[in-house]
Image (cartoon, rainbow, N blue to C red):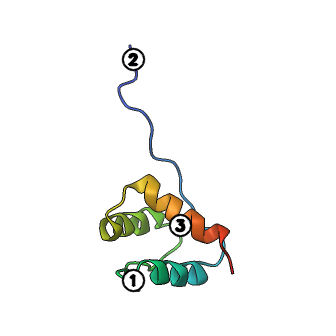
Amino acid sequence: MEPTQKRTTETFKISGNWSAQSKQLKEKYPQLTDSDLKFEPGKEEELLTRLQSRLHKNRQEVIAVIGHTQLERV
């Protein structure tokens, strides 16, 4: 029997200063609002879902965008 479903959901965690990262995201994506970027520990999936909807990107693309801001700490 072959597995019919490939596991695509990896655990996603925010690291670093979310306040600074969210400011960078708002600068890069002006359509994002404070509500879109609201983060509560343990609710990473809700944040990803909001950003996917707003940015019209899939989960992996949104994770990459956030990861990029984590690397760009200014």
Which of marks 2 and 3 precedes in the sequence? Answer: 2
Which of labels 1 and 3 is toward the front? Answer: 1
Image quarter where the N terminus lies is: top left
Amino acid type, mark 3: Ile
Name the outermost residue toward the right. Answer: 74
Say which quadrant the C terminus sits in.
bottom right
Disc on res. 66: 3
Where residue 73 appears, x then y in whole percent?
68, 76
Instruction: Say if mark 2 contacts mark 1, CB within 8 Å.
Output: no
Mark 3 or 2, closer to the camera: 3
Give the class, few, some or many, for how many residues have Cα within 10 Å of label 1's Cα (few <14, many ≥20): few
Closer to the eye: label 2 or 1: 1
Name the residue at 47% across, 78% down: 28
| Sequence-first tag of 1 and 3 | 1
Front in this rendered view, residue 70 or 39: 70
Q: Which residue is mark 1?
A: 30
Q: Secondary structure at mark 3?
A: helix
Measure the alpha-carbon separation of dots 3 and 2. Answer: 34 Å
**What's under tag 1, amino acid-wise?**
Pro
The residue located at (39%, 83%) in the rendering is 30
Kind of residue indicated by mark 2 = Glu
- Residue named by callout 2: 2
